[in-house]
Amino acid sequence: MNLKMFIRIVTLMCAVAAVSLQASYDYWQKKIYDDKKNPIRHYKELKEFEDDLKKTPFVSQKFNPVYDIVIRDFDFKMNFTLDENSGIGYMANTISGYNPGQFCLSSNPDGKAILKLIEFKLNELINKDFDENVIIEIEAIGMADGISVKNNLKYDGSLGEKLQVRYFRVRDPKNPIYANFLEGNTIMKNEYFALLRAYDVVLELTRKYKVDENNIKIFVKEYSEIGDKYRSCNLSITLKNAFLKDYNKLNDITKLFVKHN
């Protein structure tokens, strides 16, 4: 075998190895992308984290969160505590158990545990590999039961001395309402308790994650029934473009084989 032939063979072998290596890389990139978009994986991780929470003394024996995950194109959506009677969503309440007159998560350990579940998944999807193209959208539905509110009960300033909150009624989702709260001045009513339950949850999330105010919607619903399960809050969070960065790592040919929902 002469030198030229040897060089050709070695060059061919290197080219085949390079193609094989690239194909292997592309395969694993696609596998990583498909795995990140697999809802079963996310359900499993949330369930494991939920089981860990249940082992702590900080949640009640009734703690049994209900959640739904929707993955469409590059977007990731978590529905927590949606109520089939609310007109928005279709799941059972979980952030419930507020005592009459209460609206802060600090008085609701199970509600705080729900937030830990949400933050666990948000941290995995955005904090470890932050992408400025990811947009967070929040929809919260605060609820109140029909229990009578004590005469002249006033806002206690728990969420700030002065507040202005934009919200919608579930039965009228297109017309915004603005409520103003002034500590020691604003007289409370059931609709306001529903509103502040949702607002407090949103406030907790926006302290930790960057969310444009135009991507936040707060709804309220009042029940005529009485009971702690009607004093609750439902939550839906969408991460727009959550998987776009992973998709852009794929080469053009591999992208042709990626299936979008």
Image: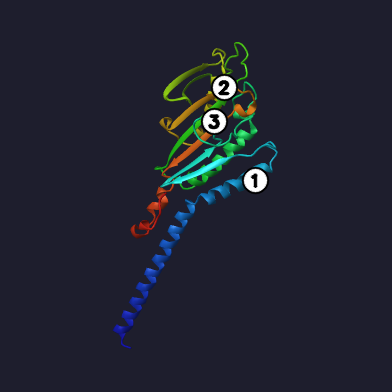
Is 190 or 216 nearer to us in this picture? 190
User: Looking at the image, is mark 1 or mark 3 nearer the viewer?
Assistant: 3
Which residue is disc 1 drawn over? 51
Q: Residue furthest top?
A: 152
- Which residue shows up at 61% across the image and 48% down it? 48
Q: Quarter holding the N terminus?
A: bottom left
Residue 258 in the image: state x and y as whole percent: 40, 55
Q: Secondary structure at mark 3?
A: loop
Say what secondary structure mark 2 lies in. Answer: helix
Kind of residue at badge 3? Asn
Question: What colour scheme was applied to this rendering of the protein?
Answer: rainbow
Separation of residues labelled 3 and 2 (CA atoms): 18 Å
Q: Which residue is mark 2?
A: 193
Task: In the rendered view, tell whether residue 179 sits above or below residue 65.
Answer: above
Marks 1 and 2, how far apart in space? 31 Å
89 and 5: which one is in front?
89
Tell me if mark 2 has few (under 14), some (14-19) or many (20+) residues whose alpha carbon lies within 10 angstroms of its own: many
Q: Which residue is mark 3?
A: 85
- Residue 165, image x and y in percent? 47, 22
**Residue type, label 1:** Asp
Q: How many badges with numbers are in the image?
A: 3
Q: CA distance from mark 1 to mark 3?
A: 28 Å
Q: In the depicted view, which residue is nearer to us: 260 or 249?
A: 260
Q: Position of residue 120 (x, y in %)?
A: 56, 43
Packing grade of label 3 (10 A; few <14, some 14-19, many >=20) is few
Residue positioned 51% across, 25% down in the render: 220
Comes first in the chain, label 3 or label 2: 3
Q: In the rendered view, does 27 fall on the left or right side of 196? A: left
